[in-house]
Every structure is written in structure tokens, then in C-alpha cells.
Amino acid sequence: PTFAFHQMDLNRHMPQILEVLDSFRPQWVVNFAAQSEVGPSWDHPEQWFQTNVVALSQLVNALKERNYLERYLHISSPEVYGTCDGIVTESAPLNPSTPYAASKAAADMLLFTLVKNFHFPLIMIRATNVYGAHQQLWKIIPRSVIYLNQGKRIQLHGSGTAVKSYIHIRDVSRGELAALEKGEAGAIYHLSPDQGYSVRNVVLRVCALMGRDFEDSTSVVGQRMGQDAAYVIDSSRARQDFDWHPRLSLDEGLAQVIS
């Protein structure tokens, strides 16, 4: 009875979105909305900027005037850092490598101007490679499972050497809620696992869990444009400020996705 769902488009229905917000007067707003996907952002970067920057600016410009808003949790992305060389903290400079990442970086910079000038109650989350059951099927983990079931070869871009920090959606959701409840206004919090794994290693683990031969199930293709070499970000702040840490190991999470 306390839940309502409204399907609206940030780019086309902003007046209606604000009308719903004003009727509900939420003390907390959590914004997951964004145009994601790195590869397609090269084809129409203007669409990514329209959603992730222009529409967002309309939303937060209106929200900064709403006296009912106490906390605004914004879901950013570690893509804004570009290649993460070494352990990257929340104060690392922004160095995006793709139109998607540039649009997210622009949005983040806009939000912090509101923090500086209007004390906007922003809390920002940057989580690494989030995965779990019901993830979009073109992502590497579910796609690997599907391809193995269909007898197709899994393509490893650039031999799969790119290092990612895979973290289960349940661990991320717990961190986001903890940030809302206990996080510092104006702060950025990283949510990441204890270590990174190469894409090759993750596919190898999926093959092992499904009883398939890795060499027979994969093929190497060229690297994707703008592919960052590594994402290994430091989540010490979240661990210290609200005692957050990942609970699900990669192998447990992969087994759940396969199931």
C-alpha cells in the first residue's frame, strides 16, 4: 500500500515527474536513472548527454527548491575516472574515456555545484561492475551463461585482459541504503569488492561452474574502443563510515546467476 509505480521519461515528462514528487513529498530521492552502455554511446553521444546531463539538470534544479527533500542519493559510475591505475579513492581526478563516461562526469560536476552553492543534500555512489540474476543479458556474465547453454563461443575482447571489480547487486543495494541512512551529505562513496578479476578469469570461472572447457568455449576478438584497462577503486570510506563490506564472494554470485 505504500508503493506506487509511474512510468515516465526524464526527457519528455519532467513536469509530470515533478507533479508526482510534489504530491508525494519524499524526504529521500534515489536516482538510478541514466542512459548507460558504453559502446553505443559512441554512435549518438548527444542522446547520452540529453538524458544524463540536460534532463538531470532540469530535475535537480527543481529539487533544490523543494523544502521536503532531505537526502538525494545519486548513482554515478567509476567510468568517470577512466582507467583506474592502482587503488583509486573518491578524490581521484575525473578522466573519462567514452561519451557515456563524459556525460556521467558532467552530471557529477553539475551536482557538486549545487552542493557548493545551495547545500544540496547530495550523497553520491560509484559502484564497480555490478552483476546479479536478471541483469541485462548482453552483459558478459549472463551472456557467457547463455552462450555456453547454446553452444556458442564467448568473445573475449582484447583477450579478456581488462580487469574489472565485480560486485553483486545485493551488496551494492545494502551499501546504497547504508549511505542514505548514515552517509555524510556532500560525500562520494565507492562500493567495490576486495579485489579485481580479469574478464578472462571471470569467464573461466563460469566455464568451470558449468562444466565446460574454456578453450573450446571462447574466442579472442579485438579490443573495444575506449575500453579502460582496469577498474580497481578503494571503498575504505564506506567500510569505515557505515561498516559496509561485500558479503557474497564472486563464485557464490556467479553460481546464483547460472542458477
Image (cartoon, helix red, strand yellow):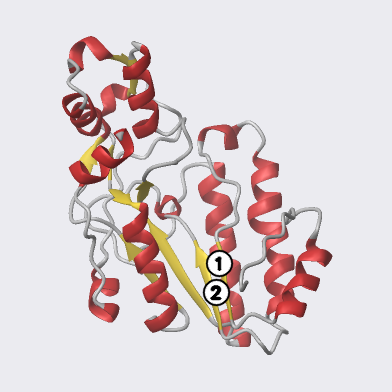
Say above or below: 8 vs 24: above
Where does the image place residue 168, in percent across and percent down from the top left?
Answer: 32, 51
Front-most of residues 8 and 198:
8
Label pair 2/1, CB-CB below 8 angstroms: yes
Where does the image place residue 245, in percent across and percent down from the top left?
Answer: 23, 66
Image quarter of residue 32: bottom right
Total tally of numbered discs in the picture: 2
Left/right of residue 66 with respect to residue 177 in the rendered view: right
Say above or below: 243 vs 215: below
Q: Is residue 141 visible?
A: yes
Say above or below: 35 vs 23: above
Where does the image place residue 161, in percent across and percent down from the top left?
Answer: 25, 30
**Kind of residue sitting beneath label 1:** Met
Left/right of residue 181 with respect to residue 86 in the rendered view: right
Left/right of residue 43 with respect to residue 87 in the rendered view: right
Instruction: Give the residue number, with chain letter if any, for mark 2.
Output: 112
Image quarter of residue 251: top left
Label annotation for residue 192: none
Q: Residues within 10 Å of mark 2 (few under 14, many from 20)?
A: some
Residue appearing at x 43%, y 65% in the figure? 125
Residue appearing at x 82%, y 65% in the figure? 16
Residue appearing at x 55%, y 45% in the figure? 36
Instruction: Give the residue number, with chain letter if any, for mark 1.
Output: 109
**Kind of residue sitting beneath label 2:** Phe
- What is the distance, in whole Å, between disc 2 and disc 1 at their CAs? 5 Å
